[in-house]
Amino acid sequence: MYWPQKGPVNTDQTIALALQRARELGINHLVVASCSGATAKKLAGRDLQVVCVSHQAGFTGPGEDEMPAAARAELTAAGVRVLTSTHLLGGVDRGVRNKFGGVYPAEIIAQTLRMLGQGLKVCVEIAVMALDAGMLPAGREIIAIGGTGTGADTAAVLAPAHASHFFDTKIKEIICKPREF
C-alpha cells in the first residue's frame, strides 16, 4: 500500500495493515517507533509481543526524555516493552561528524535507507536496536512500524540481524509506506 502523503494521518491504517499481515504470516513480534507512546498505545493489549523504541534521552535536549513517565508506565503495565537507547544509525558517528566534520558509514547507511523513505530507515533501525537489546528473538521475522516525523506511515516485515552483522538484516516485505516523502 502506498499512502499519497507522509505522516500521522496514516497511523491507524498502517497499524491495521501491519496487524493483518502479522496474522497472515503468524508473526507475533512487533517493534514500533514511538517517542510519546501514542502510537505504541494503539498496539497495547493485544496478544502480541510489542516493543516500543523511543528516541534516545538527550535527542531533544541534554538529559531530556521525550516519553512522559506516565506514558512509559502505562505501556509497561499493558505489557509493551519500552527501549530508550542510542540510535543505531546516528550514535557515535554523528558525534564524530559534529566535532570533526565528514560523513561516516552509519550515516551513509541511513541516507541509503532513506531513499526508500524515512519510515523504512526507522523500521530497520528500531528492529536491530530491539534485537541487540534482547527484546526480539534472533533469526525470526518480525514486523516493524515506523514513520516520517510523528505517527506511523511505514510497516515492513524484517528479519533483523544484530548490529555487528547489520548487513545480514533482510527486508522481506514492505507492507505500506508513503509514496511522497
Image (spheres, rainbow, N blue to C red):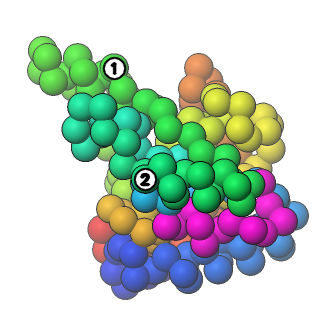
| Residue 85 x/y as whole percent | 48, 33
Q: Quadrant of residue 55?
A: top left
Q: Residue at x 60, y 45 (%)?
A: 82
| Residue 172 x/y as whole percent | 67, 55
Q: Which residue is mark 1?
A: 92
3 up-or-down from 55: above or below: below
Helix, strand or loop at mark 2: loop
Name the one closer to the observer, 36 or 134. 36
| Residue 9 x/y as whole percent | 40, 82
Q: Which residue is mark 2?
A: 68
Q: Quadrant of the C terminus?
A: bottom left
Task: Residue type at mark 2: give it.
Answer: Pro
Q: Which mark is residue 174?
A: none
Look at the image and give the residue range highlighted in magenta: 38-51
53 up-or-down from 15: above or below: above
Q: Could you classify mark 2 by the number of other residues whose Cα lies within 10 Å: few (under 14), some (14-19), or many (20 or more)? A: few
The answer to whether the residues at label 2 and label 1 have Cβ atoms under 8 Å apart is no
Horizontal side of 139 relative to 173 (left or right) equals right
99 up-or-down from 33: above or below: above
Q: Residue at x 78, y 34 (%)?
A: 138
Whether residue 99 appears in this view of the structure is yes
Horizontal side of 137 relative to 126 (left or right) equals right
**61 falls in the magenta region:** no
Q: Quadrant of the N terminus?
A: bottom right
Q: Earlier in the sequence, mark 2 or mark 1?
A: 2
**48 falls in the magenta region:** yes
Horizontal side of 95 relative to 151 (left or right) equals left
